[in-house]
């Protein structure tokens, strides 16, 4: 009975009701669009960071994080391999690396680089290596004199495939070590800085260059990701880190990506706060229209509310009736706004190309293609904000209606 009366009152003035619904629909729609874009940007930034040799977890010596030099290496990787094989969940990928700072040079140029010794069979599952080949080919385990470099680095050196590049670094004996390598292939990365920073050689070649036998500087781990998961929401990440920490030999530590990239973790956490702030800003603009229109509806019905009070209706019943009208408007507006928002996000499921602003997106660590998506948490938060705060702002017109007296109604 109460619902039927409130429903009829809602459509008593179709024009006014249409204005309120339009405001609610636009508010919900813009919130969902912004939420989808924000999630896409965050996922792209995190994906780039994880693919740029970080992974979900890295195992290193405790000293290597503070001083990434070859003397802080893992001397016996066989023990670590046994721990990884017995501890990691099904579907996880891992591989050893040797990663040191060095200098790449030829007759025309020289630049500081990060030398990365990899297992060519395992590395494509761990990083961007293997996915972004621009020219030539990838390395193989027998390629002791091959090197895989970024396209931007090769352009700076004014060289080409098959030409030599000399790598210099500090060896295990603390003396300068150098060796010439032939360029086998080049890669294109999302950020030009990545192309200039990293050069890849095989683990065997890196050990010869540094003068070590079987040592590595660390292991990189990628855990299986399911649909809708990112490194920030990955199921089992903390549990895997705890399991590894209990089993690792003395002196080794397992570091999740959040500890390896604390600035990025803080940035992503701050982004969630910005999203909630945006929701409140949009709702505030919508709330002014909502409360103003509901107040007009109450004032137009002063005589009606006064008559109801004279007939014995309690103020609480009048307040409940007005709030029910507001609830009906919010429910209809949210339903239509959600449908419009989902349709818009789905329309951009193929990705939004940001190549025209590549330098700007690179500054924030984002890729050139942003794929918007919504999480259940975002949808629930948006609907809760609009519904709960919408009822709160409607409380003022409802209370005002409940305070109308028969005498006041007769004066109108």
Image (cartoon, rainbow, N blue to C red):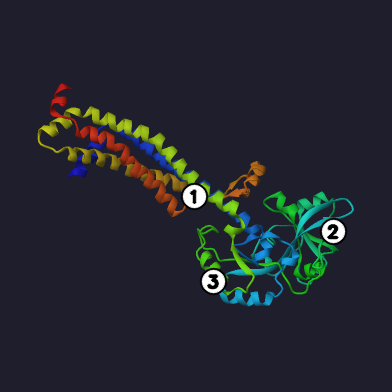
CB atoms of marks 1 and 2 within 8 Å: no
Q: How many labels does the image show?
A: 3
Q: In this view, does 353 lie above or below 286?
A: below
Q: In which quarter of the image is the C terminus?
A: top left
> What mark, if any, has residue 346 been given in the picture?
1
Q: Is residue 31 left or right of residue 183?
A: left
> Which mark's residue is nearer the viewer, 1 or 3?
3
CB atoms of marks 1 and 3 within 8 Å: no
**Closest to the observer, 190 or 1:** 190
Sequence-earlier tag: 3 or 2: 2
> Which mark's residue is nearer the viewer, 3 or 2?
3
Residue 371 in sight in this render: no
Q: Quadrant of the N terminus?
A: top left
Q: How crowded is mark 1: few (under 14 residues within 10 Å), some or many (20 or more)?
A: some
Measured Cα–Cα span from mark 3 to mark 2: 42 Å
Q: Where is residue 79 in the image (x, y as percent from the top left)?
A: 65, 77
Q: Is mark 2 on a helix, strand or loop?
A: strand
Q: Which residue is drawn at 9% across and 34% down?
A: 311
Q: Is mark 1 on a helix, strand or loop?
A: helix
> Which mark's residue is nearer the viewer, 1 or 2?
2
Q: Mark 2 points at which residue?
A: 165
Q: Mark 3 points at which residue?
A: 243
* Residue located farthest toward the left when viewing the structure as drawn: 311
Q: Which residue is drawn at 39% across and 35% down?
A: 286
Q: What element carries label 3?
A: helix
Q: Residue at x 68, y 64 (%)?
A: 63
Q: Where is residue 90 in the image (x, y as percent from the top left)?
A: 55, 72
* Residue located farthest toward the top when viewing the structure as drawn: 411
Measured Cα–Cα span from mark 1 to mark 2: 47 Å
């Amino acid at each position: 009975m109460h619902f039927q009366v409130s429903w009829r009152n809602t459509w008593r003035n179709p024009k006014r009701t249409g204005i309120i619904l339009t405001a609610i629909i636009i508010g919900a729609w813009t919130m969902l669009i912004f939420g989808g874009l924000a999630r896409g940007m965050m996922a792209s930034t995190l994906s780039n960071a994880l693919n740029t040799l970080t992974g979900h977890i890295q195992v290193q010596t405790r000293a290597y994080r503070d001083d990434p030099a070859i003397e802080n290496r893992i001397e016996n990787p066989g023990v670590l391999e046994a721990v990884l094989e017995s501890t990691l969940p099904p579907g996880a990928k891992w591989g050893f690396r040797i990663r040191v700072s060095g200098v790449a040079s030829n007759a025309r140029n020289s630049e500081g680089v990060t030398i990365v010794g990899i297992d060519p069979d395992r590395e494509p599952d761990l990083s961007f290596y293997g996915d972004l080949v621009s020219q030539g080919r990838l390395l193989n385990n027998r390629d002791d004199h091959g090197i895989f470099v970024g396209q931007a680095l090769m352009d700076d050196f004014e060289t080409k495939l098959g030409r030599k590049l000399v790598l210099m670094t500090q060896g295990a004996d603390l003396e300068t070590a150098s060796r010439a390598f032939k360029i086998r292939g080049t890669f294109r990365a999302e950020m030009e800085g990545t192309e200039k920073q990293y050069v890849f050689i095989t683990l065997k070649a890196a050990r010869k260059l540094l003068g070590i036998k079987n040592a590595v500087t660390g292991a990189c781990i990628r855990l299986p990701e399911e649909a809708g998961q990112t490194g920030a929401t990955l199921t089992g990440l903390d549990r895997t880190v705890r399991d590894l920490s209990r089993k690792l030999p003395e002196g080794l530590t397992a570091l999740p990506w959040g500890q390896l990239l604390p600035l990025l973790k803080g940035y992503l956490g701050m982004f969630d706060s910005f999203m909630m702030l945006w929701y409140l800003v949009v709702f505030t603009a919508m709330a002014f229209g909502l409360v103003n229109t509901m107040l007009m509806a109450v004032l137009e019905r002063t005589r009606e509310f006064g008559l109801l009070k004279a007939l014995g209706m309690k103020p609480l019943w009048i307040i409940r009736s007005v709030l029910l009208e507001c609830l009906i408007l919010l429910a209809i507006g949210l339903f239509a706004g959600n449908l419009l928002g989902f349709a818009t996000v789905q329309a951009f499921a193929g990705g939004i190309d940001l190549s025209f602003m590549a330098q700007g997106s690179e500054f924030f660590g984002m890729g050139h293609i942003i794929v918007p998506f919504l999480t259940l948490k975002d949808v629930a938060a948006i609907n809760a904000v609009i519904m709960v705060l919408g009822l709160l702002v409607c409380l003022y017109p409802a209370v005002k209606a409940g305070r109308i007296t028969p005498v006041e109604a007769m004066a109108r």
